[in-house]
Amino acid sequence: MKVLEVEGNVPLLGSVEISGAKNSAVALIPTAILSDKKTTITNIPDITDIDVLCDILEFMHVKVTRASGSIVIDPSNMENLVIPDELTSKLRASYYFMSSLLAKYKHVCIHFPGGCKIGSRPIDQTLKVFRALGAEIKEDECFFTITAKELKGNEIHLDMPSVGATVNAIIVGSRAKGITTVTNAACEPEIVDLADMLNKMGAKVSGAGTPTVTIDGVEELDGCCHNVIPDRIEAGTYVILGALIGTYMSIENIIPEHINALLDKLREMGVDIQVNSDNVIVNATENIKAVNIETKGYPGFATDLQQPLVTLLTQAKGKSEVVETIYENRFMNTTYLNKMGANISVKDRCATILGPTKLHGATVEATDLRGAASLLLAALKASGKTTINNVEHLLRGYADIIEKLSNLGAKIELKEVDE
Ligand code: EPU
């Protein structure tokens, strides 16, 4: 098991460069195989989710060349093989191969995807997309056999604006015959990034980033070069950290508009924050105010920033209420925040935080990616030493985090221990 040891209450100072977006990169990599030509993707974050996707590609005989921050994907010798469950179960994004293999070969056999255990996370909307485009699906426990004689464009209204279903609809629609229209689509910036890359490959995707996306299918796609957008969740996490314990912390290489909902809440809390064209400067502020938040799809307050923000809310004066509308099980971090001195009660999908409370070091368990970030932020603020177990979760999504935090002055050490 990987463990982080953190010496808390050390002010953090300096700048931190934000990496490419995990949730873009994990969609772009499975999409690259739609072409038989080479695709180069740059600004790829160095995280373990990317390692798993590369293992999946190599398993299917795709040539993968990785250099610092870039990846060249050459699918010219690719085979449509059944990806082992040990790989698909490691991340949610493995089901983007469900759509890219279906689009490329009209046939895919694949296991149910993995991902953080933050809710039930069904894939019914993606299956609905596949069926609407003409695919037949055989489901045997958690194994899917999906076949289409022909994929034909159609109109699909999603029951909820699911990111994954929107991504899968764009991938399959781009190689289907005719026009696919997705309404009630998710509007996340990562979907715009996917459409941008696909359009460079010769696809015809329009409306990405709005609730109606139209895909005019094409027979063939070319390779391309594409640079991943900055990770808005990593950016937001460091901005929250700056508000917690930063002294003139500059969060660089970001698109501030992508974290507008967070920046608005921080202003409401009274955090000292300066927003520039591609960076944000933030200082820890005395007497921050309690606020209420409700998570929403983009451009609303991101569920992925909810857990890190809860850590900051433990330092705000008064009562904050946080309503998690996307995932039913995204408050597992609060048990451990309470162990560190927070005063948080959870009822159904609402967490009530009473603050400010002093945080102190403890031994805590990371249970999911953003929950791990929430605990790390608390550990950096707390007095004394904190040990965070199971930080494999953290390394799935935060690139070079030990190095980035150490450069800001944090006293933090990653260890491998026997379970
Ligand atoms: N949903 C369904 N049926 C579906 C799909 C979704 O009921 O077929 C429900 C889910 O259960 C959930 C809600 O709809 O309650 C939203 O799910 P969505 O499909 O939008 O999420 P996702 O595609 O599984 C992506 C990110 C998540 C992020 C969410 C919401 C990736 C790989 N994952 O998940 O990222 O929280 O969108 O923005 O892009 C993370 O990075 O920590 C993370 C969990």
Image: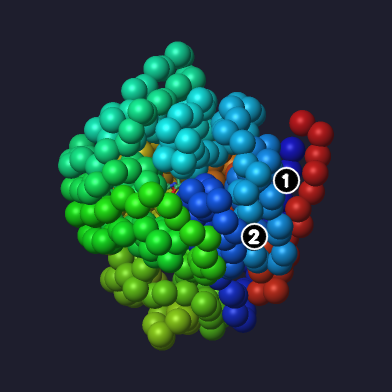
Residue 339 position within the rendered picture, expressed as x and y whole percent measured from the top left: 55, 42
Residue 109 position within the rendered picture, expressed as x and y whole percent measured from the top left: 50, 25
Residue named by callout 2: 72
Q: Is residue 310 visible?
A: no
User: Is residue 178 left or right of 61 when viewed as pictured?
Assistant: left
Identify which residue is drawn at 32% across, 36% down. Answer: 151
Identify which residue is drawn at 32% across, 43% down. Answer: 176
Q: Earlier in the sequence, mark 2 or mark 1?
A: 1
Residue 118 position within the rendered picture, expressed as x and y whole percent measured from the top left: 44, 36
Which residue is farthest front? Answer: 219
Secondary structure type for disc 2: strand
Question: Regarding ligand 1, which quadrant of the image does it lie in?
Answer: top left
Which residue is farthest top? Answer: 140
Q: How is the image coloured?
A: rainbow
**Residue density around tag 1, few if under 14, some if 14–19, many if 20 or more, within 10 Å:** many
Identify which residue is drawn at 33% across, 33% down. Answer: 150
Q: Residue 190, relative to residue 30: is it above or below?
A: below
Spatial CA distance of label 2 from label 1 is 32 Å
Q: Quadrant of residue 246?
A: bottom right
Q: Amino acid at mark 2?
A: Val
Query: Looking at this view, is 286 or 213 the one in front?
Result: 213
Residue named by callout 1: 3
Q: Nearer the viewer, mark 2 or mark 1?
A: 2
Identify which residue is drawn at 81% across, 39% down. Answer: 417
User: Is residue 41 left or right of 100 when viewed as pictured?
Assistant: right
Q: Is residue 66 visible?
A: yes
Query: Looking at this view, is 241 or 203 the one in front?
Result: 203
Residue 155 position within the rendered picture, expressed as x and y whole percent measured from the top left: 18, 42
Q: Residue 383, relative to residue 362: is it above or below?
A: below
In the rendered structure, find residue 196 and report the number of the disc placed on it: none
For the residue with label 1, is its CB less than 8 Å from the closest atom of ligand 1?
Answer: no
Question: Could you tell me which quadrant the C terminus lies in?
Answer: top right
